[in-house]
Image (tube, rainbow, N blue to C red):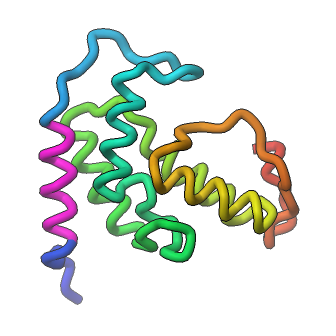
Amino acid sequence: MNFDLSDDQRALLDSVEKFAKSATRQQDAPSPDVPSDGVTARWRQMAELGLTGLIIAEDCGGLGLTVAEIVLVCEGLGQSLAQEPFITGAIVAAKLLELCASDSARTAHLHAISEGHLLRWTSLSGIRTSPCGRSAAGV
């Protein structure tokens, strides 16, 4: 079994590391409820790199990549102690929508996440029961 990174994975990691190192850090951590302008601007930059749509299917505006690429992005962002909510904003949110939202809500919100227009949401309309029989409302 070969565990070496592919050329595409190396390029992804290099891009994320350059992005993470390029921005100046704010002195205070952003509020968990209202992102600061710096985080919002950086979130849009992350979208331009395709990071916000990493695991979102291509037909919903994403890249449709795998857990391996998520790990590489987390490694690259973690090396610079990035404050952006990558896991919650781009991974957890996308998966919850994929599994539990109505078709129309899923499509609209996944496109918004992938394009960097949606960092968080306060409610999920159109929630349905997921294939495992649980509702996302209690998550």
Question: The C terminus is located in which quarter?
Answer: top right
Q: Residue at x 71, y 65 (%)?
A: 99
Within the image, what quadrant is residue 107 found in? bottom right
- Residue 12 located left or right of residue 114: left
Q: Residue at x 77, y 68 (%)?
A: 103
Q: Position of residue 61 (x, y in %)?
A: 50, 66
The residue furthest bottom is 1
Q: Residue at x 55, y 20 (%)?
A: 34
Within the image, what quadrant is residue 60 found in? bottom right
Residue 85 belongs to the span the image colors magenta: no
The image shows residue 57, relative to residue 80, as above or below, that is below
> Is residue 35 visible to the viewer in this orientation of the structure?
yes
The magenta span reads 9-21
Assign the magenta stretch its main secondary structure: helix
Q: Residue at x 43, y 19 (%)?
A: 36
- Residue 104 located left or right of residue 88: right
Residue 12 belongs to the span the image colors magenta: yes
